[in-house]
Image: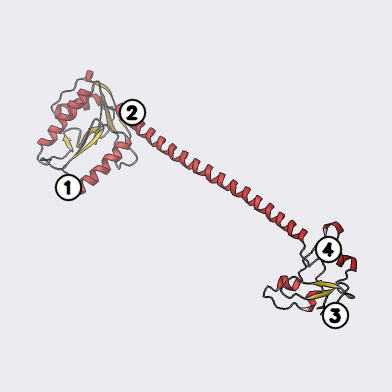
Amino acid sequence: MADKLCKICDDSVNRRNPGLQCSGFCCGFYHGRCLEMSTKQLDSLRADGVSCICKGCREDRGGTSARRSMGASLTPLLSQSSNSTGTGVITNDWMVATMQDISDKVSDFEVKLANIDEYVRKTEKLMQENLALKTEVSDLKRRLNDLDQTTRSNNIEIQGVPEKEKENLYEIIQKIGSYVNYEISADKIDYVNRVQSNKNSNSKIKNIIVRFTTRSVKENFLAHAKNKRNKRENGSPRMSITGLSDNIYINEHLTLVNKILFKEVRTVAKSKNYKYIWTKGGQIFVKKDDNS
């Protein structure tokens, strides 16, 4: 070995004073004795083909010469067979162990990534199921509303008749029938009662719900009420009946959902100058004018 200066003691590194050469950027030499290594340990490292990198080269990636103080950290890792470990030197065994550690971490990451993928898949499935359930619930609500409206097919709702003590609702209905020129006998009325107005109404007067024995009786009653209204000069849906009220309204008995929808349709239709808005059989209709 040609004479080289030890980076720790500045003496020559040669056959009589053997040492190791750094495989890093500095390519510096270090006496075995300066590293507190025996000749046997040096020979073992050379025989195993161990690559040694000083601490300075590991920390100084720019390739500048390592400081002397760093040379002292070049204590080598002996081969696995020697069962001895130092610090500051990268050995083949260290590389294998490091690669195994990286491989284990990658495997662990892949497991976690797979778990995340499974979580995302389950979340997407739950979102799809939730959307399907919302659609199903919406459909069920619509069907229930339609069924509820069907049960009201023979009903009308009368608003604006003040409640009086010991009143006879059958007589009130018959009086309204006489006013609209449609005589109603008691046997055509299946049921009549007052109900509280919905919470969105400002009226404190309870409405009157009438269920006729047949749908045709209900339709005829509403048709006569409409004709009576149309014959009035102002065409107002409000009726004034002596002895009852000046603000009587007669309509189909709609479900709360349909009442809200009817109110919204009327608002939009009026804003677009539609002349007619009405209901029949629980359905809502609009008409632009007499010619449409």
3 and 4 marks in contact (CB < 8 Å):
no
Which residue position holds label 4?
Answer: 47
For marks 3 and 4, the one nearer the N-term is: 3
Earlier sequence position, callout 4 versus callout 2: 4
Q: CA distance from mark 4 to mark 1?
A: 102 Å
Which dot marks residue 96? none
Decide which of tag 3 and tag 2 comes sooner along the chain: 3
3D distance between C-alphas at marks 1 and 2: 32 Å
Q: Choose between 29 and 190: the one closer to the eye.
A: 29
Give the amino acid at mark 1: Asn
Depth check, mark 3 against mark 2: the one in front is 3
Quadrant into which the N terminus falls = bottom right
Q: CA distance from mark 3 to mark 1?
A: 108 Å
Image check: 20 left or right of 124? right
Q: Earlier in the sequence, mark 3 or mark 1?
A: 3
Disc 2, SS: helix
Pointer 1: residues within 10 angstroms few (<14), some, or many (20+)? few
Q: Which residue is mark 2?
A: 147
Disc 4 + disc 2, Cβ < 8 Å: no
| Whether residue 231 can be seen here | yes
x 74%, y 73%: residue:
56
